[in-house]
Image: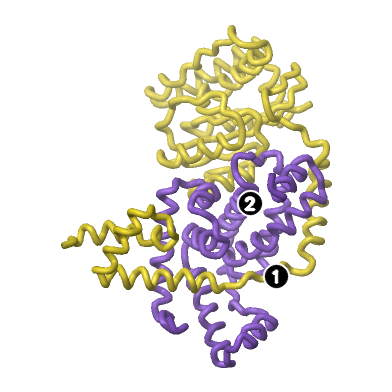
Chain colours: A yellow, B purple
Amino acid sequence: METEMDCRKWKKKINEYIDDLLSEDQKAAFELHIANCPDCSREVHELREVVSMVKTLSRKDLPNDFELNLRRAIETDELRRNVSVRKRIDYSGIIKWTGAAAAIFLILFGVLTDRFNLNFLEAYPQQEQQRILMEATPAQEDAATDNAQNDANLMTPSVAEESKPPAVDATNGKDLEREAHTYTADILRIETNAIDLKVYNVKVTVDDLRNIAQMHGIEVLDFSCQGVTLSVEEDHREILYRELSLLGQIVETGDRMGSDTISIMILYGVE
Amino acid sequence: MSEEAMVVEEALTGNVPAFEKLVSMYGKRIYNYCYRMTGNKEDAEDIAQDVFVKSYRSLGGFRRNSQFSTWLYRIAYNACIDFHRKKKFVTVHALEHDEDNRQLVTEIASDGLSLEEEVLMNERKNAVHQAIAKLRPEYRTVVLLRDIDGLSYDEISGVLNIPLGTVKSYISRAREELRISLHYEFGKDGN
């Protein structure tokens, strides 16, 4: 005699049964159950009817001028971006670092405990930001480090403690990797050391980042032409990381999983 | 390599006619998905256009470890979710009555249905359309992808970027909600 417990167990399998996803054994056992359970049997019948009703919905034809309008929309978009698809640079593989003439997309994934970090960069005109980020001289690095220390002092003690710059090992690997690493190290200091995830090799816009966030119900606190600030609950963080990993090549992840405010900045390497 | 895969490969090299072929292969599916997600044709057309503009622009971001159609659906899903979030703060979106075009009605009639049966069938379709529109977007998406577009659970998991277990539970909950809201329709087609 089957118990109510068995019934609940089988109810969970009803849709897999309808979609014919159960193994032969499971299917046979399920059919044995519904033969003796009017309740589950009725449910199977009704859910099948729901599925067949949904399947009766017919597909509408594309609007007549759909393809023509699309061609125009693409042309407009291309013009706006001034990029021909044939000229699109392939960023796949290793980052090609050519001194100051780097073509790199870099996402900085920093955890901000306050908004000061972003404001620090926003205070500069964009070109100046690029210069700071890409060509930090030793003197600027020191200044940036000082800023970082100051920022850290503003935070709660536990956060400040965590904010020690991660040791950057620039001694191994090829020159190219070292240069790229040094490059990000400069940014690390400017960003109050609070980098959690770096993704290279990315083609992404601020809109894409907002879409990703919105798609997963992550609140967008703020956005600008350079990036987004998100409020991320713990279980969303993993999803976000996974999404970002699909966009490019993750080169470093941090262990700072506690903070719930995250800023993602897109830095465009310029030729 | 399937014809579909070859067209995708060509489009990825920047071949414009190949991309246009992709549009003719997937355009109707994406447009209809957007139609059922938004509930009206005008928004569906705008979003579907946007989906293809975006996909053309970001072809380089397509990873060959998934199917091209899954990738397209994913862009479409994101665009529809974005649309709903924006709309929520602007207006209540217009849900169209789901009318089949005249031609189809005539075809049905020639299948031996009486005028009364035709009307009933259209009412029934409209009830389903409305019931689907009432589902939350995630549930609506799984129903559309599974029962109209015939995607596998795995493919749906790729489109929504959620685990397989979550797909199963979305499908169960979505169909359960439809079962409740369409209850009064059961048995009307003679089943």
The answer to whether residue B165 is above or below residue A170 is below
Q: Quadrant of residue A183?
A: top right
The answer to whether residue B148 is above or below residue A221 is below
Report the Cα–Cα distance between label 2 and label 1: 19 Å
Residue A235 seen in the figure: yes
Q: Which residue is mark 2?
A: B69
Q: Secondary structure at mark 2?
A: helix
In-front residue for pair B148/B35: B148
Q: On the rendered structure, is A263 left or right of B110?
A: left
Q: Which residue is mark 1?
A: A61
Give the class, few, some or many, for how many residues have Cα within 10 Å of label 2's Cα (few <14, many ≥20).
Answer: some
Residue type at mark 1? Answer: Asp
Q: Secondary structure at mark 1?
A: loop
Q: Where residue A170 sits in the image (x, y, percent)?
A: 59, 10
Residue visible at 33% across and 53% down?
A25
Residue visible at 59% across and 43% down?
B66
The answer to whether residue B116 is above or below residue B151 is below
Q: Where residue A146 sits in the image (x, y, percent)?
A: 55, 15
Q: Where residue A138 sits in the image (x, y, percent)?
A: 65, 10
Q: On the rendered structure, is A50 left or right of A198?
A: left
